[in-house]
Each structure stands twice: as C-alpha cells, then as structure tokens.
Amino acid sequence: MSKQNIKAIRGMRDILPGQTSWWQRMERQLAEVLALYGYREIRTPILENTALFSRSIGEQTDIVSKEMYTFTDRDGSSLTMRPEGTASVVRAFVEHNLARAEPVNRLFYLGPMFRHERPQKGRYRQFYQMGAELLGSADPAADVELVDLMVECIGSIGLRDTSLQINSLGCDECRPAYREKLVSYLHGHEGSLCDDCKRRLRVNPLRVLDCKKDSCVAVSQDAPHMVDFLCDECSGHFESVRLGLETLGRSFEVNHRMVRGLDYYSRTTFELVAKGLGSQNAVAAGGRYDGLVEQIGGPKVPAVGFASGLDRILLLLQQELKEPESMPVVYMVTHGDDAWLKGLELASRVRKTGIKVMADVRRGSLKAQMKRADKDGARFVVLIGDDEVASSTVSVKDMAGEAKAGEKQMSVPVDQLVHWLKTNLEKEKAK
Ligand code: HAM
C-alpha cells in the first residue's frame, strides 16, 4: 500500500530551527519596547464564537464574508479561528470587567491569526501579529501614543525604511454625509469600477477607496476626502493627533484613501508601510475604535490600537540584518565507556555554570564526532579518552580558524575546566 506524504496546509508553514532565532530576537526586542510604554501582555484563545468577529469586524468585510476559518463544533455552535486580535481582547476586557479595576488599560498580545486569503509573498493563511490596545481614553494623546509606539516597535527591531500614513474616518455624526457624497461621486464613475467595487458601492462604499485595481485607483484618486467632511470635534481631534506626531518628530503623510478593512474604526486610522514587499507592504496598522466595547456588550469605553504583521517584517529584516548570534558551543567528544560517563557528568557540570555544551549522542568514531562538532559550530572541543580519565584531565581543542589548522590541543585538569573555558570564552568576547 502506498503511503502518501502528508504536508502542511497551503498558506500555513513551519518555522524551522534555522528561523526561530530571528523570531526570538524580534519578540524580545518588541517586549522591551512595550514594557517601556507600560503595556502588559494578554493571552486570549485562538477559538472564539463566530458572532464575536462578524459583529465587530463587520459582516460585509472581506475578512468576515470570505476569509474566516469557521466550523461547527460538536455541540452545534459556530466557532471561528481568530482572524485578528482586537475583537478577542475587547471580549476579554468586557468579560473580566477590566475597566472596573483600571480606568486605562494598556494591553499587548502576540500570536497566530488565521485568514483564508490567497497566499503570496508576505501573505499567509496562518500569520503572526503583535498588537497593542489602549482602552479607556478618547483623548488624542492616546492616538499619538499608539502611533508612536507602533513606529518605535518596528524601528527597534531594525526596520527603519518605512513611511507612516494617517487618516480620519470621522464618527457616526459626520461620516453619513461623507458617505452620501462619496456614493454620488462613485455612481458617476460606476462604469470604470471592477465588479467587486460595484458590489461594494452598494454595501460598503468606503471600501472602494481601498481597491488596488488600476481602474478603481484612478476613480478614487479624485474622490472627495473624508477630512473635508469632519465635524468640529473630529476635526479638532485629528488636528491634535497631527500636532502630537509632529512634536514627537514622527513624520507622516495623510492618505485620504486609507479606510482600513475592518468596520469598527472611527476617527484616526494609520498604517506603516515598508518598501520591498510588493503589494503586501503594510507592516503595521490600526486605529481608533470608540464604539466597539459597547457593541460587544460592555460599557462606553473609547479605545485605540494597532497590530503588526511579524511574518512580513521578518522577510524584510532578513534582507538587511545579520542572523542573530547564538552562544558559543563547547562540544564534548568521548572515546570508551568510562570516558562516556565522565563526559556526561562533566557536560552537566559545565552547563550549570551557564556555558553551552553539546555532547555526542551517537558514540561514533573520534573522527565522526570531531566532524559533527565542526558542523555544529563548536568553539572548543573537550576530548576525553582512557588516558584523560586515568589522569583526571581533559584535552581541549581550539576550533577557531588558525588554531584549528595548527591542531592546537592542550591538556587541562578536570577541576580547572570550567575556569579555563570561562577565561577563554571571555577573551573571545572582548576581541
Ligand atoms: P489588519 O490591517 O487587518 O488590522 O492587520 C494588521 C497587520 O497584520 C497588517 O498590516 C499586516 O502586516 C498583517 N497581516 C494581515 N493579514 C496578513 C496575512 N494574511 N499574512 C501576513 N500578514 C498579515 C488588524 O488586524 C487590526 N486588529 C489592527 C488593530 C489593532 N486595530 C486596532 N487595534
């Protein structure tokens, strides 16, 4: 019977050990910045009730109407694998009544999200986001903090060639008038719109501004701007956000066509765009969502947040940065049963002092073990054979360039090995 290979699902990929050091460094750097701004981690489940996302992101959005991984659970309820983190954070915020304990909550999360999109460079069906949400302030200071945090986070991990775009989508007071104006403008150009946009024009006209098709871009270029229709409050809010960003030296450009693909936004929206990624060039994005907490059954709590696409960021970083350095390795090579036991014991003792030790686990020939040590990038090899066991010493071989070629090997008493390794690894670091 033929056995068929089972492969990973399209758009979902393994992150192998050669890659994980990049992820670990990026996650460490992000956590440091988030801590400086006072954000604390929240972890929510991957599965949620489908209604959470359809109600918050919006039935008519691409995410909800075509991209969610939704299935019926054994008890008949409809569950969905989270396509983003904001709805889940807000659900948890309401469920645990976090507003009661703290008037302002600064939260962050990191983890996989799932969208059934067409996979391409920088776009996956399982992808990773780091997101931050500030709940409890309607003040422009909160918008400025979030945008500043977003740019700082992405810059701190080494991605600096980015540009910041902002817009305001107004509020329930002023958006209807804009919407009306936009619809009448778009009707005048309906013949040039793609089929998708013709449908959007009826159900969600603002989304036409976001279409990437050439003919639709041409139409939306001359479309009326939301910022010209903002009510006094929204206009003042947007002005303060711009002023705050200017004061912080965060340069930006107002992108009148940035409407975002989720329905919960009001007022400020923003995106950080990078070069070198083709069409999937948004590395982080977010905005204000003052109505969402109430919509999910909570009190009236204004909020603002962003999420960054870590897979995309890493694609860019790997073009620009060097691989993160790992700790130098000491490799234990043994020959004979007594030496093997001695090697086990010694490896464990050296590791306890904070030095990385790898030991041969296949007990091959000395030559095979040395080859393995070289392949694993050993800095020093500790050799133990019958002679060494008898004399309570070990032989240490320096594997660095010249020393290795010169077959430099020295005898070190067992009880001095840790000291010897520490001194020599320190010397190396100081170089
Ligand atoms: P979003 O714009 O849908 O917003 O996603 C944020 C970021 O996630 C995007 O800018 C992109 O970098 C990344 N991303 C999205 N889809 C994919 C994909 N299929 N493959 C790879 N990366 C992807 C949100 O998710 C909102 N929750 C952001 C937010 C937080 N708004 C307020 N708070």
Image (cartoon, rainbow, N blue to C red):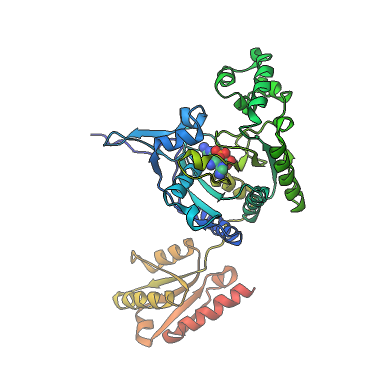
Q: Is residue 77 visible?
A: yes
* Marker count (numbered): 0
Q: Is residue 123 visible?
A: no
Q: Position of residue 178 (x, y in %)?
A: 67, 26
Of residue 121 and residue 125, the one placed in the foreground of this image is 125
Question: 228 left or right of 381?
Answer: right
Of residue 263 and residue 385, the one placed in the foreground of this image is 263
Q: Height in image: 425 above or below 378? A: below
Q: Position of residue 273 (x, y in %)?
A: 66, 41
Residue 334, quarter of picture: bottom left
Of residue 117 and residue 244, the one placed in the foreground of this image is 244
Question: 262 left or right of 53?
Answer: right
Question: 82 left or right of 180?
Answer: left
Q: Position of residue 124 (x, y in %)?
A: 50, 38
Tell me the quarter of the image containing the C terminus: bottom right
Q: Height in image: 378 above or below 290? A: below
Q: Residue at 56%, 50% (x, y): give it.
A: 136
Residue 239, quarter of picture: top right
